[in-house]
Image: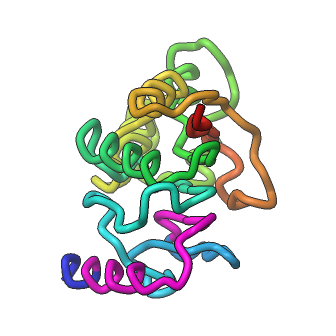
Amino acid sequence: MILCKHHKGTRRIRHLPNQQHLKLHIGCGLKIKTDWINIDFSREADIALDVRKPLPFLEYSCSTIYSEHFLEHLDYPDNAISFIRECYRILEPGGLFSVGVPDTEWPLAEYNGQESGGYYEIAKERWHPEWCHTRMEHINYHFRQGDQHRFAYDFETLTRALSSVGFHNIQRRDFDPELDSEDRKLGTLYVNAWKQQEK
């Protein structure tokens, strides 16, 4: 089923009339962006693709790639790094990869007593199931999300993954209401990374 959808999505991309300055929203789920190519296996997406495989876009065909709460669902390092490498390949020189992942620094820092940002109270109220009572139960749910999450990121690890394929000028950024999902404003690590300009 997944392979069939991927092949269908690949054929649709090959028939795009213009593969220049594309804006991709990868792992969109139900959060569809206007004037973007929304990629996911959800019915609302424009195109279904298995992004663990090479992306069927031309080299230098995209100006911007955006992904929010998707990267953590890929196995690290193999699938995650392959996906990031493909994003780098299809971006035009100077292109932007903007990514948001659950911020794992926050619960771990609070667990170690390094900060007091109310993570556990907020997680209990907004995100985690009723069976989460102890801090370690919350940590486990944060990491695993019922086996949906494959890896947890902090800024250091995400920066290393992005730079390993060539991205530079990697910066943590603030929540952007024009781009990001309001319901993910709290608890998300947002990062921008750029592809090198050609010399």
- Residue 133 belongs to the span the image colors magenta: no
Q: Foreground: 85 or 49?
A: 85
x and y percentages locating residue 183 in the rendered image: 68, 60
Q: In this view, does 119 lie above or below 70?
A: above
Task: Write the residue at 44% across / 24% down.
Answer: 160
| Quadrant (top left/top right/bottom left/bottom right) for the C terminus | top right
Task: Write the residue at 64% across / 43% down.
Answer: 94
Q: Is residue 133 toward the left or the right of residue 25 in the image?
A: left
Q: Foreground: 65 or 2?
A: 65
Q: Residue 109 sits in which quadrant?
A: top right
Q: Is residue 34 toward the left or the right of residue 27 in the image?
A: right
x and y percentages locating residue 152 in the rendered image: 40, 36
Count of numbered labels shown in the rendering = 0
Q: Is residue 115 toward the left or the right of residue 90 in the image?
A: right
- Residue 7 belongs to the span the image colors magenta: yes
Q: Which residue lies furthest to the right in this view?
A: 177
Whether residue 120 appears in this view of the structure is no
Q: Is residue 67 above or below residue 165?
A: below
Q: Residue 3 sits in which quadrant?
A: bottom left
The range drawn in magenta is: 6-28
x and y percentages locating residue 193 in the rendered image: 60, 37
Whether residue 24 appears in this view of the structure is yes
x and y percentages locating residue 85 in the rendered image: 37, 43
Q: Is residue 77 above or below residue 186?
A: above
Q: Is residue 65 toward the left or the right of residue 41 in the image?
A: right
Q: Foreground: 165 or 107?
A: 165
Task: Write the residue at 50% across / 21% down.
Answer: 156
Q: Which residue lies furthest to the front in this view?
A: 199
